[in-house]
């Protein structure tokens, strides 16, 4: 856990391979807390971070991939875009083994040397990585573009930004200019070749981001970066995929 000076806590899973090592973001409001994404779910959040659940937080799932929703079953209330809700209700493809995961997702490794096991430690003695699953999830609050989530003292606007998946969202705190991007944008290679991905739609989503007034981006993977870098990354993708 890494507490930032803007009232946001970054939670990471250091024993997960970088392929599935995602961020969880914990925001505290005066009325309620919110958690953006829920990690792999290999290690129990309630067991390891009991303080996270003291105020019955709402979890917002930025999209329906295992590294963002694996721990979502531990939250009493879950929110996601209405498109992602449909995918979550069916159960998302999941495996802790690289080749199996690529096969489950319908991805072509294209000669890439995939890691065998995607975790380098077990949460407890006797844990069987082969038994890992992400069971179907009920979304209690289907979200739409421009919905507002009010936590008391701070609010976040939902931005539907499809392309990586049809149900991708980001959350914008307009008061601070903070944007929680999920997998829509991070400082690395953006994945747009999944069977559910749509590069032309992704371009439109990132073109919208490039014009957004953002001071800092908190991504689904890796470290936060400033608004200048966000606009640069968005412009680079839009330009590269238009040529």
Image (cartoon, rainbow, N blue to C red):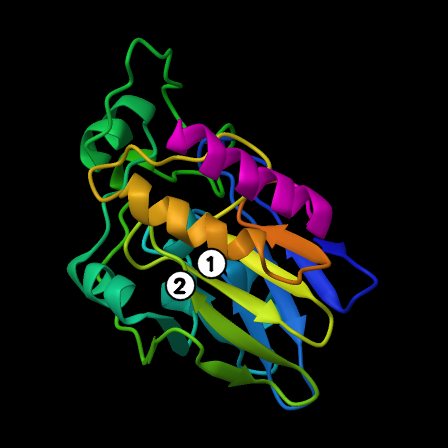
Q: Residues within 10 Å of mark 2 (few under 14, many from 20)?
A: many
Q: Is residue 31 left or right of residue 136?
A: right
Residue at the (20%, 28%) spot, across then down = 103
Q: How far is the residue under mark 1 from the one under mark 2?
A: 5 Å
Q: Residues within 10 Å of mark 1 (few under 14, many from 20)?
A: many
Q: The magenta stretch spans which residues?
A: 223-243
**Label 2 secondary element:** helix
Quarter of the picture holding the C terminus: top left
Q: Residue furthest right?
A: 5
- Magenta highlight on residue 226: yes
- Residue that mark 2 sits on: 72
Image coords of residue 112 (percent x, y): 36, 12
Residue at image position (31%, 40%) is 199
Residue 73 seen by the camera? yes
Q: Is the residue 153 above or below the residue 158 in the image?
A: below
Q: Is residue 2 above or below residue 125?
A: below
Q: Quadrant of residue 86?
A: bottom left
Which residue is identified by label 1? 38
């Amino acid at each position: 856990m890494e507490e930032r000076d803007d009232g946001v806590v970054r939670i990471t899973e250091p024993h997960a391979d970088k392929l599935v090592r995602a961020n969880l973001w914990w925001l505290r409001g005066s009325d309620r807390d919110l958690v953006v994404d829920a990690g792999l779910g290999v290690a129990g959040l309630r067991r390891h971070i009991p303080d996270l659940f003291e105020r019955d937080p709402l979890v917002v799932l930025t999209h329906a991939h295992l590294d963002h929703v694996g721990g979502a079953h531990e939250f009493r209330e879950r929110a996601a875009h209405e498109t992602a809700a449909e995918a979550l209700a069916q159960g998302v493809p999941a495996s802790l083994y690289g080749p199996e995961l690529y096969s489950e997702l319908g991805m072509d490794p294209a000669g890439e040397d995939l890691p065998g096991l995607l975790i380098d430690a077990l949460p407890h003695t006797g844990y069987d990585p082969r038994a890992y699953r992400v069971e179907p999830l009920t979304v209690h609050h289907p979200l739409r573009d421009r919905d507002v989530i009010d936590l008391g003292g701070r609010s976040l606007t939902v931005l539907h930004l499809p392309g990586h998946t049809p149900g991708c969202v980001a959350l914008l705190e307009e008061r601070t200019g903070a944007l929680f991007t999920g997998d829509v944008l991070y400082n690395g290679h953006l994945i747009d070749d999944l069977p559910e991905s749509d590069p032309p739609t992704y371009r439109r989503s990132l073109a919208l981001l490039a014009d957004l007034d953002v001071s800092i981006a908190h991504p689904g993977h890796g470290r936060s970066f400033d608004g200048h870098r966000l606009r640069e990354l968005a412009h680079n993708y839009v330009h590269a995929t238009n040529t």
